[in-house]
Amino acid sequence: MMIALLIISILVFLYIVYVLVYPERF
């Protein structure tokens, strides 16, 4: 269960970084 939460946290972090790096897409 902890591994799943870790993977979800990493995916959310990468998504936030993507939005911050490419703000013109939103």
Image (cartoon, grey):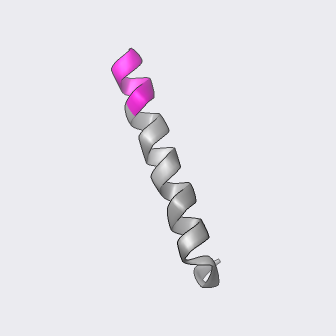
The quarter in which the C terminus is drawn is bottom right
Residue 24 sits in quarter: bottom right
Q: Is residue 5 above or below residue 22?
A: above
Q: Is residue 5 above or below residue 25?
A: above
Frontmost residue, 1 versus 13: 13
In the shown orientation, is residue 14 left or right of residue 21? Answer: left
- Name of the residue lying farthest toward the top: 1
Residue at 54%, 73% in the rendered image: 21
3 relative to 8 in the view: left or right: left
Task: Give the side of residue 12 with respect to residue 3, left or right.
Answer: right
The residue lying at 43 percent from left, 41 percent from top is 10
Q: Quadrant of the N terminus?
A: top left
Q: Is residue 4 within the magenta segment?
A: yes
Magenta span has 8?
Answer: no
Q: Is residue 2 above or below residue 18?
A: above
Task: Estimate the x, y position of residue 13 in percent, counting from the top left.
Answer: 51, 48
- Please give the name of the residue rendered at 63% of the width and 77% of the height, measured from the top-left corner: 23
Residue most toward the left? 3
Residue 7 location, x and y as percent?
A: 38, 34
* Picture quadrant of residue 25: bottom right
Compared to 4, does 8 lie above or below?
below
The front one of 21 and 25 is 21
Q: Which residues are magenta?
A: 2-6
Main SS class of the magenta portion in the image = helix
